[in-house]
Amino acid sequence: MHVANGMYGLILVEPEGGLEPVDNEYYVMQGEFYTQGTYGEKGHQPFSYEKELAENPTYVVFNGAVGSLTEERALTANTGETIRLFMGNGGPGLVSSFHVIGEITHNVQTTLVPAGGATIAEFRVEVPGTYIMVDHSIFRATDKGAYGLIKVTGDECPLIFNPDPRPISE
């Protein structure tokens, strides 16, 4: 019951000498809430054992709440920086298909994180913009809350991404 009520977290045991330094390190934890009420319903929401048995959560969220990594709480970086995400999945029932839209995390497009598991995802951001972190079991992001933002500022890099369809030489 404690996991179904959001009582979970990550513990990082670094190798002797620590991890290689990066510019930004962030904690992202996915979890599920099985409530008797519907998505977005106001007020206290008692636990639904029936929804948990059916593995049909009302919410699938990052860092404990819908929108927890958006707006002024979005993760941030500058172009040319490396981001390290410590990504965990508290479950209690679903496997996460973690993905950052617009980036490749060291040769991996989407990575599976089992309930009770974790991973470390690293990538370098070369282009400014807003990158979206999702559980790529996509309706968990669009309809249940499993999404967050990474806002990257800095210089454009038209050789990597050019929103203007004209050739760069013009």
Image (spheres, rainbow, N blue to C red):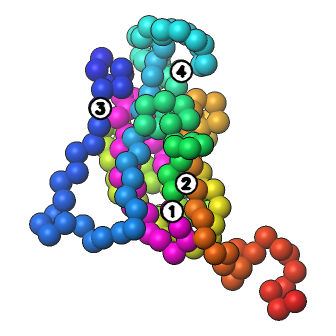
Badge 4 or badge 1: first in the primary sequence:
4
Whether residue 143 is visible = yes
Q: Is residue 160 visible?
A: no
Residue 88, placed above or below residue 43 = below
Return the disc, 3 or 4, that comes first in the chain's sequence. 3
Q: Residues within 10 Å of mark 4 (few under 14, many from 20)?
A: many
Magenta-drawn stretch contains 79: yes
As measured in the structure, the alpha-carbon distance from the residue carrying label 1 to the one carrying label 2 is 7 Å
Q: Residue beneath label 1, please? A: 77
Q: Amino acid at mark 4?
A: Thr
> Mark 2 packing: few (<14 Cα in 10 Å), some, or many (20+)?
many
Q: Quadrant of residue 50?
A: top left
Q: Is residue 6 magenta?
A: no
Left or right of residue 156: residue 87: left
Q: Secondary structure at mark 3?
A: loop
Residue 153's image quarter?
A: bottom right
